[in-house]
Amino acid sequence: MRHINKKNKKDINVANKFTGEGWVYSATVKKHFFYPKNLLLKDPKPGDFDAEGMVGSPACGDMMRMWLKIDPKTKRIKKLKWRTFGCASAIASTSMFSVMATEKGGMTIDKALKIRPQDILKRLGGLPERKIHCSVLADQAFRKTVENYFHGV
Amino acid sequence: MIKRIYLDHSATTYLDKRVKRVMDLFWEKNFGNPSALYEEGRRAKKALDQARADIASVIGARPEEIIFTGGGTESDNLAIFGVVKALENSASKQKKHIITTKIEHHAILNAVKNLEEEDFKATYLNVDENGLVDPIDVKQALRPETVLVSVMYANNEIGAIQPIAEISEIIKEYRKNKTGIREKTPFFHSDACQAAGYLEMDVEKLGVDLMTVNGSKIYGPKGIGFLYVRSGVKLKPIVYGGGQEKGLRSGTENLAAIAGLAEAFKISQKERKKESARLIKLRDKLIKGILKTIPKTVLNGHPKKRLPNNVNVSILDIEGESAVLYLDARGIAVSTGSACTSRNLEPSHVISALGRPFEYSHSSLRFTLGRKTNGKEIDYVLKILSEVAGILRKVSSLPLAEKLKK
């Protein structure tokens, strides 16, 4: 992954910063990794979604595609689906992100854009420090998909 | 708990019971310091000499050519830094030069990189698409100021077996025709940690000047290894102290581990032909099964010139760390060359050196079989792997990306 900074590269600490546990991933992370939520299993039909976006490249080792269904009146997120060529951290954080954006009747786009990687990490019970950058992928894919929703790009 | 299927023997092996039995004598009974003059010391010294002699006889060397170290990494470091430090005051004023390969273990690569920072020149030889070094490339890289050539015997990730004897012939020929410099360099070092359990280890047949072996890959203890140093090859120590191991590796000898290493190495070499034949059948069954039952898979490394226990495949569109964790949850332990699991977040330098795109590294899985691996386990792994690949390909967005390109 080329997009990570030098500091991350040097960091080899795999202990969970939040729980202090030795195992690489928290129970919540494992749950979302093994049973991801809102994964799009079948290719969508035209009209199923209002927008889609894709970020990353397989060469970098992570790639994500996201689909959105938006309530035209309330601008709330009705559906947020995704697929990824990504590691456990990317899968778990995207799964959690999709839950956060769609729970309780769905967030508005504006509010969902304010979800920070730290917020996802908190809900996941943390990630190993060297894998935190993987949680950024969901955020990037979401921004790209929102762009597609508003501007069709 | 589900039954575990351990397929990561190239990472490390468990301790052979026969080895443990030998080691047990040294914790309370024969605990003495081999440097001491009295009875306990003499008994320890005798065991140390015996272990050294046993190893020497297996590789066709003399006992005084075996230096015990703290493992494979230390043996590699002693070979590299030991040789260059011993030549520090030699007549040549030109920058000294080292030849190695792009697929070496980090114990070699990072040591050589360190020397590059200290005014040494280094050549990292390419390998072909099967991971093999071409001896002609060694010949072309040799220069008068080359002091050391280090080529691993068998690669730890893709199992590729290098033509060590051929490379040695080229180096000997080069040395013979060399004039003007006092030391007959370059010396030839080979890291044989992965090879020690399966391949011919006779140093005369291989033609090596220095050779690394460790215990933790051959059902011996961890934290112990040896460096074979051909007599006449001058080394300087990297660890200083009481002058044990001919001054090349100070520190009270780890006698239990040394005796364990000797026993493990003797057993491995004695059983290697039979065990290799058994493992090759299982290895090829696994390779064929994967390539046949899972679409879009490729074998990394040479199909035949590879370690009997090594299978390395890229299962395209699935990410290695995810696959390792899904397999782990189903009781199977394997490893991957994906960046996501490595400490420095870089994809495998070995698979990249084969000239394959990065996604092949990210999708690579390594299965390394061992003494307890059987056909039933391979059948189970094939079944589970096919399931896991199916699940993870549903999660992956790559097939869609390819559709878009069309």
Image (spheres, coloured by chain):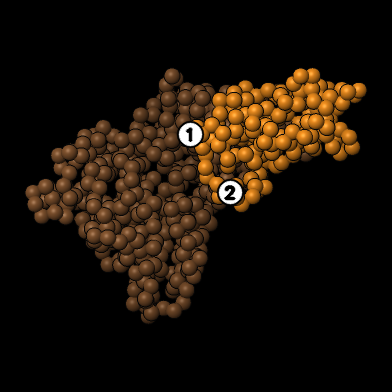
Chain colours: A orange, B brown
Say if labels 2 and 1 share a chain: yes
The residue labelled by disc 2 is A9
- Tell whether label 1 touches label 2 (CB within 8 Å): no
The image quarter containing residue B378 is: top left
User: Which of label 2 and label 1 is nearer to you?
Assistant: 1
Task: Give the residue pinned by disc 1.
Answer: A22
Q: Position of residue B216 (x, y in %)?
A: 35, 42
Residue B170 vs residue B389, the one in the foreground: B389
Residue lying at the far right in this picture: please name it. Answer: A73
Q: Mark 2 is on which residue type?
A: Lys
Give the residue displayed 51% in from the left and 59% down from the top.
B125
Badge 2 crowding class, 10 Å Cα cut-off, few under 14, some 14 to 19, many 20 or more, is some
B401 with respect to A128 (left or right): right
Q: Chain of mark 1?
A: A
Using the rendered image of the protein, determine whether residue B346 is visible from the camera's viewpoint.
no
**Relative depth, front residue between B334 and B142:** B334
Is residue B125 in sight in this rendering? yes
At 50% from the left edge and 32% from the top edge, which residue is drawn?
A21
The image shows residue B400 at horizontal and vertical percentages of: 74, 32
Please state which of residues A118 and A92 is positioned toward the viewer in this rendering. A118
- Residue A136 in the image, given as x and y percentages of width and height: 69, 38
